[in-house]
Image (cartoon, helix red, strand yellow):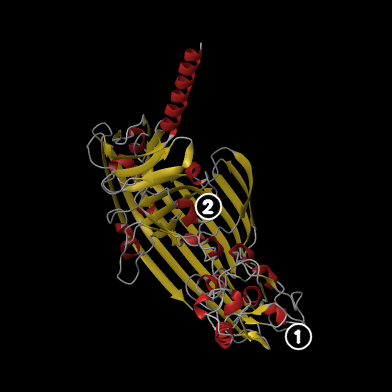
Amino acid sequence: MLMKKVKLFLACLLAVVSTALYAQNITVRGTVTDASTGEPIPGAAIVVQGNATSYALTDVQGAFSINAPRNAVLEVSNMGFRPQSVEVNGMTIVNIALEPDAEYLDEVVVTAQGLTRKQKAIGYSTQVISDEKLSLTHSSDMGNSLAGKVAGAQFWGAGGATFNEGSIILRGATSYSDAKGNEPIYVIDGTIATAAAVNMDDVESINILKGPSATALYGSRGANGAVIVTTKKAQEGTSSIEFSHTTAVETYYNHIKFNDLYGGGSGTSGLTKTVANAIAAGEDVTKIDWTSPKHLYEDFGDGTYVMDYYSDENWGARYDGTTLVRSALSFDPTSSKYNTADPWQARLNMSDLTRAAWSNTTNIAFSKSSKGMSTRVSFTNVDRQGVMYNSKAIRRSFSIASQLKPTEWLTADFSYRYRYRSNKNAAIEGYSADGNVVCDFVQWGHTNVNIKDYMDWQRPDGTWRTWNIHSTDDLTAEYHDNPFATMYNYNSTTVFNYHLLSSDIYATLPLNFRLGVRLNNYILARQRDYKYGTGSKNWDSFFRTYHLQDNDFTAQGYLTWGDQFVDTRLTVEAEASAQARRYADW
């Protein structure tokens, strides 16, 4: 009986061990190729089933590497190919061949100048992104909406606190001075504008034109590719009201590992006195703990210690958690921390500079279609707090699109789109003493500073409190202002007003001819206001406002013809057009 129990125990133990080993992650490598040609597929996505955060993309050679459980299932996909699920089964080398998607090749896409083609009939690289894919993760900005959805494209983003929508680069670097290259043009219902002018709630589909052949009709402006945006229209014979609301919250995530062993300062005035006293007493100075705050800092005379606040470096005493050291606020009679001291320990928490930022996006749209006329009206409002205090972004969009068809052969399309875009105190990136409060503690700063203590940044006389005082009897800033004072006094606001007007009037003539006129007008009005308050060490009080405007008007007359031959297998199309453009800025 005992032997049977032992055998049973060993069998259970072996099962548990083998199950644990089988669940361990392994590194899976391989290539993804086109099953019809054998060519590698760059930009294919490999995702561990059930874990969307565990993924990899293939490189230009179609190669990939991903960490996955031994029993995982890999989901492999790429635009224009049928998705495939592959069981790992403990294999470390997995090669996948994707079958082309015939339905994708039959899709009709919008190309340059409003022309439509079947995907398989064009000789250059394009990619269509539908409304369903764009709305999976709702974003009011074009750049963030396209991130991760365009094969082979580079996405250059920015911190969320900058309110920057990011940018898509289709053709890589185009100059020695700009590593990321230039953005493509954005064509919104025929009007060339910028990504910031697009309201994503109005987008029906997006077509990405990458190659030079695809953008030839746009001339030099299409040198970096084109993003063709088709907006929503009223559906024939229907009336509808659409409403949507999205609430989101952003929080700061700190991925920087700060020094938590030594505190602020770089002076040795306390150590000089300690050594002098030891020599006078005949003690062995080599046994002195050179990094202790009791030896490195000066004794205030009551058992507390004073550090060198004027230094913005962090080469001070080792944290011991017991020695009482005064902060800069200890010498400010108007502060609640006056004449107090705290145990010597690391307190810097960059999250204390930020808040939970709420964003609310509301869209309402009305559409109606009847015989000979259809109209869609849409309004979107976005109110977004910034994670940095005293910062916010506002986006307001209005659009109206109508189509009139007074006769069977005459059609007139009209649209007007307006977008208001305002950023207040968008976070500044890069090295800067003015406005970049994060840099003050990443590049400089003391890790012993409790940022929360400085939220009450203003004294009754209007002067500012700071951690970087000149001395214990001179409380002005040596180098760095109070970060909260900076956020509330270093104010900059940018306002952009986008106006897009489009019209296309055309007649359908016999023998498949079409004669028409397109009018497009893009107006951008910009205003920048700078308001700097008094009390800073780093800037003087200041006010300035800028007002700028661009006006880009294009008129085009065109004649097109097209027909199909050989049982619709051969399509022949031709277009002749004349265009005039007038651009002005002031």
Q: Secondary structure at mark 1?
A: loop
Q: Residue at x 57, y 68 (%)?
A: 426
In the current view of this chain or complex, which residue is farthest to the front? 282
Q: Residues within 10 Å of mark 2 (few under 14, many from 20)?
A: many
Give the residue pinned by disc 2. Answer: 200
The answer to whether 176 appears left or right of 534 in the picture is left
Instruction: Give the number of the mark in front: 2 or 1.
Output: 1
Q: Is residue 77 above or below residue 110?
A: above
Q: Position of residue 176 (x, y in %)?
A: 30, 70
Q: Position of residue 278 (x, y in %)?
A: 57, 83
Q: Position of residue 357 (x, y in %)?
A: 64, 58
Q: Is residue 1 above or below residue 504?
A: above
Q: Is residue 569 above or below residue 423?
A: above
Number of numbered discs:
2
Q: Which mark is residue 186?
A: none
The amino acid on which the numbered mark 1 sits, given as a three-letter code, is Asp
- Residue 516: which quarter of the image? bottom left
Looking at this view, is 579 or 70 the one in front?
70
Residue 105 in sight here: yes
Q: Residues within 10 Å of mark 1 (few under 14, many from 20)?
A: few
Q: Secondary structure at mark 2?
A: helix
Q: Residue at x 54, y 50 (%)?
A: 202
Give the residue pinned by disc 1. Answer: 461
- Residue 173: which quarter of the image? bottom left
The answer to whether 349 appears left or right of 120 in the picture is right
The amino acid on which the numbered mark 2 sits, given as a three-letter code, is Met
The answer to whether 237 appears left or right of 105 in the picture is right
Looking at this view, is 472 or 231 the one in front?
472
